[in-house]
């Protein structure tokens, strides 16, 4: 399984989750786990997704999600799970 960590951070607004999930579904990316919180007016979401069925390269997906984030006023970052794990190991 190819797992990717997606983080979304920014000012809360209507439709953030809908727009991100619509992109993922349209690219055959399955959401395995999701955590979302709002602290005052700030939105924070972390997703673990399975990209096995995705037909794009990782970099293309990451670039498209970054541009989507710019459109909706949030910062969207993607990291492969193995890199995320190595960076956050204690």
Image (cartoon, rainbow, N blue to C red):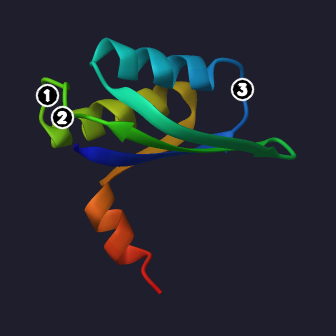
Instruction: Verify CB contact (< 8 Å) between mark 1 and mark 3.
Output: no
Contact between marks 2 and 3 (CB within 8 A): the answer is no
Judging by the rendered image, the residue that carries numbered circle 2 is 60
* Residue contact at pointers 1 and 2, CB within 8 angstroms: yes
* Percent of width and height locating residue 3: 30, 46
SS class, disc 2: helix
Q: Which one is in front in this view, the residue at disc 1 or the one at disc 2?
A: 1
The location of residue 18, given as percent across then percent down, is 57, 17
On residue 56, the disc is 1
Question: Alpha-carbon neighbours of circle 2 within 10 Å: few (<14), some, or many (≥20)?
Answer: few
Q: Is residue 18 left or right of residue 56?
A: right
Residue 15, image x, y percentages: 64, 18
| Nearest to N terminus: mark 1 or mark 3 | 3
Query: How far separated are the C-alphas under marks 2 and 3?
Result: 26 Å
Quadrant of the image occupied by residue 14? top right
Residue 82 x, y percent position in the rendering: 27, 63
Q: Residue 13 carries which label?
A: 3
Residue shown at the point (19%, 26%) measured from the top left: 54
Identify the residue shown where x is 37% and y is 69%: 85
> How dense is the environment of label 1, judged by Cα within 10 Å: few (below 14), some, or many (20 and up)?
few
Quadrant location of the N terminus in the rendered image: top left
- State the SS at label 3: loop
- How far apart are the alpha carbons under marks 1 and 2? 6 Å
Q: 75 or 85: which is nearer to us?
A: 85
Q: Looking at the picture, tell me which residue is in the foreground, 11 or 3.
A: 3
């Amino acid at each position: 399984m190819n797992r990717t960590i997606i983080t979304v951070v920014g000012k809360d607004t209507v439709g953030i989750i809908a727009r991100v999930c619509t992109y993922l579904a349209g690219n055959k990316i399955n959401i395995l786990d999701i955590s979302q919180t709002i602290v005052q007016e700030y939105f924070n979401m972390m997703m673990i997704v399975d990209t096995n069925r995705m037909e794009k390269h990782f970099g293309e997906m990451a670039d498209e999600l970054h541009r989507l984030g710019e459109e909706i006023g949030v910062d969207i970052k993607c990291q492969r799970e193995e890199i995320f794990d190595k960076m956050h190991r204690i």
